[in-house]
Amino acid sequence: MAALMDRAYVEMRPWTAQDISSTLASPHCHVLPDDHGFLIAQIVADEGEILALATDPVAQRQGVATSLLNQLITMAEDRGVARLVLEVASRNQSAQAFYRARRFAPVGLRRGYYTLRDGTKDDAALLSLVIAQGQHTPEPTSQGSDAKSG
């Protein structure tokens, strides 16, 4: 997973294998794997948070991220989650467009949140999706719209 994240997070500093291992040690964390990507989320009470979504660059825009996000939304609905939240780098406009197309709305900004590979900082846009129980219609996975991660 760390190697895939290293390929997928072009500008962002990727997580290390230790970062991933430590995160997944939490009983609230869930990993949704795919042959070409993965999603890591945590669910606590009625809120879910997307911690990482990575798609191998050779498989981007082929529905991997859409499929993983739809799986998470279905899991969240099944567990009674009221909303999903995430942060995405302010300069990552394609990822923001990906989430906004799936009804995630901007709710805030965290200044200097991300450290980029070159050591500079970038703000994090906070996005949220309200989950209306039984109202989600998954996006088709074959539409060819995937976000670059980070």
Image: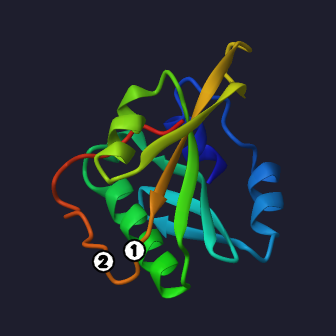
Q: Residues within 10 Å of mark 2 (few under 14, many from 20)?
A: few
| Residues at marks 1 and 2, CA–CA distance in whole angstroms | 5 Å
Q: Which mark is residue 135?
A: 2
Tell me: residue 116, above or below residue 80. above
Quarter of the image for residue 26 reads: bottom right
Residue 32 spot, x, y in % from top left: 52, 69
Residue at 52% in and 27% down: 10
Res 22 quadrant in image: bottom right
Q: Give the number of callouts.
A: 2
Q: Amino acid at mark 2?
A: Gln
Residue extending farthest to the left is 143
Q: Where is residue 17? Give x, y as percent.
A: 76, 50
Q: Relative to the observer, which residue lies in front, 147 or 131? A: 131
* Rendering coords of residue 9 (x, y %): 54, 34
Quadrant where the C terminus is found in the figure? top right
| Marks 1,2: beta carbons within 8 A | yes
User: In which quarter of the view is residue 147 placed?
Assistant: top left
Give the x, y percent position of residue 58.
34, 41
From what the image shows, is residue 26 above or below residue 20? below
Element marked by disc 1:
loop
Q: Residue at x 34, y 53 (%)?
A: 103
Q: Amino acid at mark 1?
A: Ala
Disc 1: which residue: 132
Looking at the image, residue 46 lies above or below residue 111: below
Residue at 38% of width from left, 46% of height from top?
99
